[in-house]
Amino acid sequence: MVSVGTRSILSLAWLSLPIFARAFSMDPEASPSANTELICPTDNQAECYPRIFQPTRDFQLIKPGQDIPPGLHVRLNISSGLKEARLNIPMEGDDVTLDLDIPTEQAMVVIEGAEVETSEDLQPPSDAPAYSGHGKIQPPPPSSSDFESFRTSLASLKEQDISLDSALVSLSELSHDIYYGSELMADEEAVSALICLMAMESSGPGDENDHSASAALSGSLQNNPTAISSLSLFHDIVMKPTCPFLRENGLSLIPALQKKLSASTTSPSSLKSQISALSGLLKSPEIQKSFLEQDGTSYLQSVFLKSGSQYDVVRKRIVQLLMDNFLDDSMGARIGVWPKVDVIQKGEKDCNGDVINDECWACIERNQQNACRAPGEAVDIYTQISAKMLFFSFFKTLVDHEVTVELKNDIQIKGILKSVDQYLNIKLDDIQVVEELKYPHLSSVKNVFIRGSVVRYVHLPGGVIDTALLEDATRREAAQQATKGK
């Protein structure tokens, strides 16, 4: 018989307490936190990954079963149907331009969820002062060297003295400052002198006064509402200049520019600067109205049709002028002023050669080929518009119509057109993928945003536009591409 003392029993009891305490502290039902819980698709622990997606600055594949935290930048690879995500923060190189070569697989974004209802706009009180977006323009200190240069150059411009050449160069540089631009456009005598110089034929290769005058007008009016407002007060001297050489010949501004266009001394750089100046002038509703009355769009078409690659940059400026002032409301254009819908839809069927009128504006000049069967031919889409007239006003009228977008990777997507911009970025709702069996991963997608850089063609509804014209344009483009490839 073995006897155990009381002290020994107490010692054993104290030794056992940590074991019991540890056993009681472990909950067999507990699991790791959500942040550390793993998903293991196989028995190999090396293939496990967190249940909660861990975002970084770079796009990563979202693996099966992973939960996505809110607020991430998620994209869908339309070729594989897999989703990727990253932190939704501005990244270096994210600035999107027309020249970026974006893969088609990265150029379509799925729009998930219903549209957010906007609350009613708050109405300002009836006695609130008129809103001025540009605010008060602070003048530079009188001691500034630019201030003195502006003062002397402005006087030289008005007097047309021997320092005119250098004065125009100085004004064209200073005009980009919002203060000097506003002051220049508020001076009626100075504006009249600049308009006359812009319309005057150059005396020779070394005479660039017309170019400098156009640059001063363009710089003053660019993103300068105050200058545009000032200009509207004496718009008559802009479209009907008082210069002796124009008045004697009975010429207003557009006929004078048309006459100047045929002069051998009119250079592409001069025309480029002139078109930029006209674009700024057209921001004034009064000047825009007079411009159309003088058939200014026919003048623009005459410039656009000048042959030679040296005029490509001028053609691009003309396209931008039309977009900014007539076709793109996001840039402040008043839609419906020009072109008139009935003129475009009922245009003549003969727009060949040198025909100049609104009906033929929808023609796209194709290298040396000027054959355009009808205005609707402009539905053929080109994303590089440097030497082609991109006339997309048709697309503005097709919002809420069904269209089919064909991508460069051959996927065709049918849907309701909700929006399109000047770069042909397209938003479609209620989409349906043609040949859906080939792309099952897109079957659940209902709304998409497609970058214009990956669009091959947009097929338009026959009830709105003659789609035979699109087919003709497509065949000609294919033939040209085949010729280039030989």
Image (cartoon, rainbow, N blue to C red):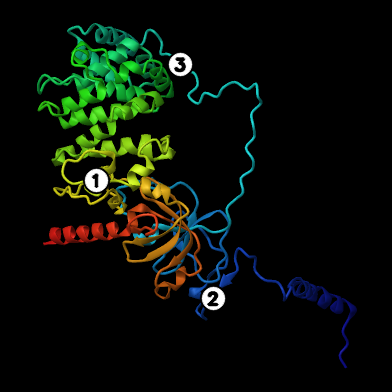
Please say if the residues under marks 3 and 2 sit with CB atoms less than 8 Å apart: no
Q: Label 3, label 2: how many angstroms apart (C-alpha)?
A: 65 Å
Q: CA distance from mark 1 to mark 3?
A: 42 Å
Residue at the disc numbered 2? 40
Between residue 290 and residue 127, name the one nearer to us. 290
- Is 248 displayed left or right of 466 in the figure? left
Describe the element under mark 3 as helix, strand or loop: loop
Q: Identify residue type, mark 3.
A: Gln
Label 2 element class: loop
1 or 3: mark nearer the eye: 1
Look at 39% across and 50% down and name the residue there: 395
Image quarter of residue 4: bottom right
| Label 3 crowd (10 A; few <14 / some 14-19 / many >=20) | few
The residue carrying mark 1 is 388
Q: Position of residue 447 (x, y in %)?
A: 49, 59
Residue 460 in the image: state x and y as whole percent.
Answer: 37, 58
- Quadrant where the N terminus is found in the figure: bottom right
Please, what is the three-letter code of the amino acid marked with disc 1? Lys
Front position among marks 2 and 1: 1
Q: Nearer the viewer, residue 2 or 247?
A: 247
The residue beneath circle 3 is 138
Amino acid type of the residue tagged 2 in the rendering: Cys
Work out whether 89 lies above or below 187. Answer: below
For residue 14, above or below residue 472 = below
Mark with earlier residue (3, 2): 2
Image position, residue 26 (x, y; %): 73, 73
Instruction: Give the numbered dot on residue 241.
Output: none
Residue nearest the viewer, comparing 331 with 234? 234
Residue at the image position 50 percent from the left and 69 percent from the top: 63
Which numbered disc flags the more N-terminal residue, 1 or 3?
A: 3
Quadrant, the C terminus: bottom left
Q: Earlier in the sequence, mark 2 or mark 1?
A: 2
